[in-house]
Structures are given as structure tokens and as C-alpha cells.
Amino acid sequence: MDNFTFGITMLICGMGGTILTLWIMSLVMGLLGKLFPEKPEKKEA
Amino acid sequence: MADAIVNGLSGLTIGFQMLAGDWRNGIMLIVGFVLLYLGIKKDCEPLLLVPIGFGCILVNIPLSDVMSNEGFIRAIYDAGITTELFPLLIFIGIGAMTDFGPVLAQPSTFLLGAAGQFGIFITLIIALALGFPQLDAVSIGIIGACDGPTAIYVTSKYAPHLLGAVSVAAYSYMSLVPVIQPPIMRLLTTKKERMTVMKAVAKPVSKTTKMLFPLVITVLGGLIAPKGLPLLGTIMLGNLMRESGVVSRLTKASENEIANVVTLFLGLCIGATMVGSAFIKPQTLIILALGFVAICLDTVCGVLMGKVMRVATGGKVNPLIGAAGISAFPMAARVVQREGAKWNKKSYLLMHAMGANAGGQVGSVIAAAVMLSVLAGMGIIR
């Protein structure tokens, strides 16, 4: 594979893959945050 | 008798003769002393620069056999660098030390961590344009991850002859983040943008979410980029141990004893790759220059992503926090806080920047993992 094709492939797949993966992770973590919200500690009577 | 004495004495002077015969060893001895000076006197990453500097001195003393087949550093090198074990053990420690709470409180800051990795790929292209072979260019680009262990992991695997230059560049520029980033941040933002006060992050994160985070990231990241699973898995293992709170002995060992011992060995091994004949080449200077370019580009892209987020949120985001989307944790976040406070005393960006910085920590590992998996997909590595 020539260097030009290699470089462009790495830029598109590598950077695109990184952004996509982190975006998916941010969505999943946002969802988890909603599913398991922090509950305030109950005060003992 | 006289011959025997002369021969015996020549054995004591041959080191000086050989040092005079190869100026490159002399230069590298000076480099070793400079690294020691930076570590000891200037407090630049001393945990690494001291063993690196000393390793560099050891290997450049003529007739030194520390890296020969029976040499003691060669034994450590083969055990921990050739096997890729040391960077991974360091990663367990990093995971055990890192609180990902700020990024979990604001998952959108993951995107700043992604933008902070652009430098890797642009530098890779520049390295290719300068004529470096493909896997060498990958290893040079990875300096832009601003993450020593990741750079060492990738370089030791695919371009071991560049390990010294890449590692020194990665760690040196990481320690220079407070010098490199502020001018770029000022250049790319307006005074109004820099003065933006961001609302405090008040959203607490539950312990369940914090514990699920390493598991989700490992499985999801592993499925997307399996070639980087060792990197991702080890950092997340360390973090799971931290957040679960049930293995405090292992957590403490990972962030203290194991990390300390491995850092010592890792530094010695990196220093020992800096032998004059292999290190003093125009190529090394180009690699150091490209490493600098990579970290500048990371900062540029991070700040630009911050500006995009500012537009998307109607001006609520201070774009300076984008500069923290790199892996130098928590140094980059502190730089952002300091820079923000310089322009507006009421601006308190630290928690937002910590989110971006933690995102950058994950982002650098993900970028390396994705890169390796893309390379495997293209059939360039197995």
C-alpha cells in the first residue's frame, strides 16, 4: 500500500474511529448516569 | 613481565581511548547528564528522567555490556519491554490513580478527549511525507497521544529502534505542557471566549456508574478495537479496583510499589536504548520535532473542538477547556485552570478541565487501540 493511501486511511478510519468510539462511550455513560443516579444518603432517624 | 604490566594498564585506559574514538558516546553522556539535571534540578518528570538519564550514561560508557546479551539491563528489557509488560503494568497503576468522576459527570467532555488525539494522525501523515516507513510513522504519531506508556507500548512493538527517541519526546513534551499550551490557547481564542465563566459541575456520579464505567469501556472498546485491549483492559482493571473499594491492598500496590518498580525499570531500559551510534542521527532530531508538532496539534484541535462546543451550547463553554483533552493528567487541567483564572478571576474551570483531561486519558488509549485495529484490518500488522 502506498504512503498516501495509508495516511489517508489512517486519518479517516483512525480519527473517525476514535471520535465515533468516544461518542458512543459518552452516550452509554450518559445513559448509565441516568439509569443509576446518585441517591442522597438517608438520614438516620 | 613489562609487557604484562603494559597490557594490564592498557585494560584500564581502553575505555578512555574508545571514548575519544567515538564522539557520539561522548555526546550521549552529556545528554544523559542533561536529563539528570532536568529531572533533579528542574523537577521535570524526575521519576522518569533520572533512570532514563542514568541508563543513557550506563550504555554510552565504552565497552559497557549492560545491553549485551548477558547485560543486566538487557535482561530487564527482554522481560518487560520486548514482552510489552511494563507499559501495561504502569497502566494498571494509572487506572488505580485516576478518578474518572469528572468525565462521567459530563460525558460530552469525552469529545474533547477525542479532539485532543488529532495530532497523532496528522503527525503520522507528516512523518510519512518526510519519508518514514509506515510503522515508524505510526510510532512517531503516537507521541501525540501525550501518553508515555501508550507511546512505549506501540513503539516497542512496531518500531523498537525508535523507542529511545519516541519515549524521550513523549515524556519531555508532557512535562513541557505548561509551556507549550498557553500560547496556543491564547492564539486561538478571543478575550471574550477566555473570560467565559462555566457553571459548576454539580451533578454527582453514583458508585454504580463509576464501577460500571471500566467494565463498559473495556467491553465496548475491546469489541471495537480488540488490538488495543491490553492497553484498555489494564487501565480499566486498575480503575475498577479503585472504584470497587474491595481490593484496597491491590489498588495501593498498583499505584505505589508496582508502578514505582516498573517506572524504574522502564526508565533504565529507555535510557539504555539511547546508545550514541543509534541515537545521534538526523532522524532523531526530526522525531523530536514531530513530537512537538503532534502535541501542538493536539492542543489546537482540542481548543477548536471547545469552540465548536461553545457554539453548540450557545456560548456556555469556555473553549480553553479543550486544551485539556490530552492525556497529560492532571497537568493539562491545571494549565487550563491557571489560564482561565488569568483572564477572569471569577472563572473556575478546573472541574470542567478535569473532565476533558480524563476524557483525554481514555481518548489516547482508544486512539492507540483504534489505530492498531485499523492497521490489523489493513493487514499491516498481525
Image (cartoon, rainbow, N blue to C red):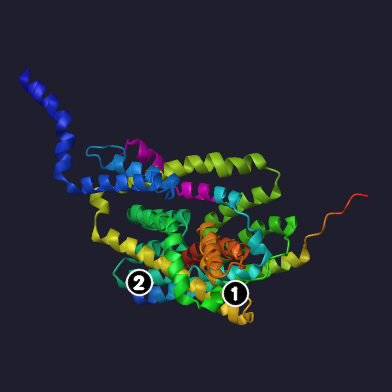
Residue B335 sits inside the magenta stretch:
no
The residue segment tinted magenta is B68-91
Disc 1 residue type (three-letter): Thr
Q: Which quadrant of the figure has residue B220?
A: bottom right
Indicate the secondary structure of the residue bearing disc 2: helix
Closer to us: B282 or A6? B282
Q: Residue at x 72, y 68 (%)?
A: A31
The label on residue B196 is 1
> Mark 1 to mark 2: distance in Å?
35 Å
- Percent position of residue B192, x then y: 55, 78
Residue B88 sits inside the magenta stretch:
yes
Closer to us: B220 or B196? B196
The label on residue B263 is none
Q: Main secondary structure of the magenta part?
A: helix
Q: Is residue B47 left or right of residue B237?
A: left
The count of marks equals 2
Question: Which residue is labeled 2 in the image?
Answer: B126
- Percent position of residue B95, x then y: 58, 52
